[in-house]
Image (tube, rainbow, N blue to C red):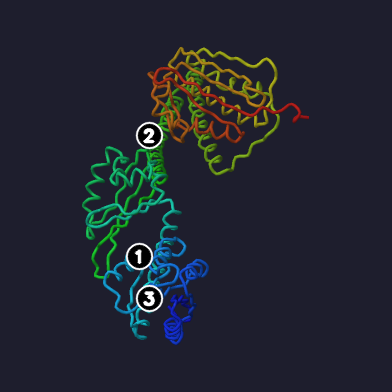
Amino acid sequence: MDPANALILNVDDNDGARYAKTRILQHAGYQVAEAENGSDALAFVMSQLPDLVLLDVKLPDINGIEVCRRIKSSPASAMVLVLQTSAALTGRADKIRGLEGGADNYLAAPIEADELLANVTALLRLRRTQAALHESEERFRQMAENINDVFWTFSFPERTLQYVSNAYETIWQRSLADLCEHPNSWFDGIHAEDRERVHASFNQFIATTPYDEQYRIVQPDGTIRWVRDRCFPIKDGADRMYRIARITSDISEEKNAERMLKQADLHKDEFLATLAHELRNPLGPIRNAVALMQRAPPTEIALQEKARAIISRQVNHLARLVDDLLDVARISKGKITLRLEPIEVEDFIGAAIETARPFIDSRDHTLDIVLPERKIRVMGDLVRLSQGINNLLHNAAKYTPSGGRISLQVEQAGDETLKIIVQDNGIGISPERMTEIFSLFTQGESAPDRAQDGLGIGLSLVKRLVELHDGMIYADSAGKGQGSTFTVELPVLKQDAVA
């Protein structure tokens, strides 16, 4: 510390002794203030916070040891250095009392100038070091308390917990107070399947053995969070490890993204296999029909007509597959354009029923239809809404064994919402499939008659079309064999919004 920047309070009721010490310090370049008694000294310390107090033990009002105790006991002045001084022939007990009272050092008269300056310089150097350490610790504390990761420090080799940041409570959902009382309780929050591995790995950590683990935390409410846990050695000047620093990061989002990528990759493989299968299915009948037409004489009109019907039916099936693929691609790239206009609900519902009816009838299903008595309008694209409802009806017929029952119910819920409910008594949806039923390339369970053809993009397409109309769709099923219910909600067009 530059002497010119250091302020020293010289406290002594002896004018001559006080003057001598002040001159020595000023000659060395220090700023010096003076006080003749303990009360003035305390008032000065509290108002000016000098860097060091040169404090004589014997004062006329308050004993110097008491003055020192008060300085050190106040949080505001605890960092002020105190160099206690006393008259000659001071006993060993007096020095001990002075140091126990909080003095940073103790000098007994007679005090030589170089001895005084050497002690003052050493104490101020100590203050500078302490201030730098305190500032460093404060920066560390603020950093640790304002990041989302948990920061820990442990002693080494004992592995005694020394510090943990507040983020522990966020990730573990357990209190810091409990952790401080039971330092190893953080193990209790680890998933039972991961706990033994993490415990062994953490306890084996040394400077040459890395600790980098990923495991699950089970919060008190049952929520599972994934974390990445790493330890780093802290070494002293002799390159000896004396402390362990540890950082725990919440990687739940990364794990979820990783899981979704794996599922997408799996769905992609399933889709490619399904696509190859679905494209081959109509090609076989088309090839056979063409061969039949080539072999049959032109006079065989009935045979020619049968072959043409097979080709037409299978080409329509191919066209439907390609159209679905193109629609999904357009929506995914944001290239689909809706022709929005006020439309009657019964118009797009009727168009959907008309399109789906042949397939429903071909499977001997009964279709029950319940429409609202009064007219309801929505702002939408008639073709796209009809396509969405047709897909739901087609899906219900496909996943319901022959001779089943399908219902289509349209109702208004409140003043602003239209509900379209498609229900069947088919094969249902298992709970594990329910969470991904609207995902791209996801197909449902197999029906007993294996009637379900398609690429697994129908429900994903419906969901995207509904969302483009500011609506939502959700599914419900009691499980396998219990049928399924799909509900579409669309905003009702207010009557005063239509000319």
Q: Nearer the viewer, mark 2 or mark 3?
A: 3
115 shown above or below 106: below
In front of the other: 11 or 28: 11
Q: Earlier in the sequence, mark 2 or mark 1?
A: 1
Q: Which quarter of the picture shows residue 234? A: bottom left
Q: Residue drawn at (29%, 78%), measured in percent from left and top?
A: 89
Separation (CA) of disc 2 from disc 3: 54 Å
Badge 3: few (under 14), some or many (20 or more) residues near its Cα, within 10 Å? some
In front of the other: 222 or 390: 222
Badge 2: few (under 14), some or many (20 or more) residues near its Cα, within 10 Å? few
Dots 1, 3 in contact, CB < 8 A: no
- Report x, y in % for residue 226: 36, 43
Secondary structure, mark 2, is: loop
Q: Earlier in the sequence, mark 1 or mark 3?
A: 1
User: Hey, which residue is sitting farthest front in the picture?
Assistant: 60
Separation (CA) of disc 1 from disc 3: 21 Å
- Report x, y in % for residue 360: 51, 17
* Circle 3 residue: 125
Identity of the amino acid at label 2?
Gly
Q: Nearer the viewer, mark 1 or mark 3?
A: 1
- Report x, y in % for residue 179: 33, 45
Q: Residue drawn at (43%, 69%), measured in percent from left and top?
A: 80
* Circle 2 residue: 222
Q: In the drawing, does residue 40 fall left or right of residue 55? A: right
Secondary structure, mark 3, is: helix
Q: Which mark is residue 403?
A: none
Identity of the amino acid at label 1?
Gly
Secondary structure, mark 1, is: loop
Q: In the drawing, does residue 33 fall left or right of residue 157? A: right
* Circle 1 residue: 101
117 shown above or below 400: below
